[in-house]
Amino acid sequence: MKPIQSFTVDHTKLLPGLYVSRTDGDATTYDLRTRRPNAGDYMDNLTMHSLEHLFATVIRNGPHRDKILYFGPMGCQTGFYLICRDLPREEVKKEIFRVLQEILRWEGDMPGGSEKECGNFRNLSLEAGKAECRRYLNELMKRRITFEYEV
């Protein structure tokens, strides 16, 4: 069987960053790699779940809300996928920075943080979500973003 496209990237050399994983017509899948793969430093479920709630809420309420198809964690616990429709790469980059900064300023309750709204509502932490945002923003600031895997 032919490997899927994301398995063709050399994960032994991949660094945190922002990459285009694939393009399918007008939809582009972005790899928001918050951590280096296979380095022993993985997000725990609380962190992934919390950032998923925060990021998805902020981006789906932002200026490009109609072009956001999906945001969710990678099973390998080293990042997230963002799927957008008809949104230029530079706009996606600006939006990701805007979303991360807005999350860091978030003062309210955890979005979707009740039993009625979430299937595992006790496994959420605003502090953990903000910490991962801060970590990822720091990683992005260290690198030139080309959207290409540099491995």
Image (cartoon, rainbow, N blue to C red):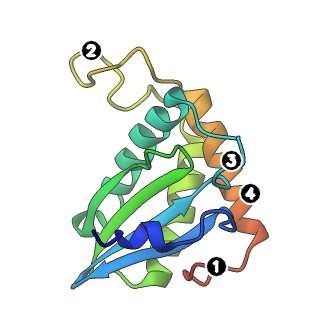
Q: What residue type is labelled 1?
A: Ile
Q: Do labels 1 and 4 touch, CB within 8 Å? A: no
Q: Which amino acid does label 4 sit on?
A: Asn
Please name the residue shown 54% across and 45% down the image: 103
Q: Residue 145, labelled with which disc? A: 1
> How far apart, in angstroms, are the residues tagged by discs 4 and 2?
33 Å
Whether residue 25 can be seen here: yes
Q: Which mark is nearer the camera, 2 or 1?
A: 1
Q: Characterize the local packing of mark 2: few (<14), some (14-19) or many (20 or more) Cα atoms within 10 angstroms.
A: few
Left or right side of 28 for 48: right
Residue hosting label 4: 138
Please name the residue shown 44% across and 33% down the image: 49
Residue hosting label 3: 134
| Residue 40 coordinates in the image, percent (x, y) | 70, 41
Dot placed on the residue nearer the N-terminal end, 1 or 4: 4
Depth check: 106 or 85 in front?
A: 85
Residue hosting label 2: 115
Asked if 136 appears above or below 20 in the picture, the reply is above
Asked if 25 appears above or below 139 in the picture, the reply is below
Q: Do labels 3 and 4 touch, CB within 8 Å? A: yes
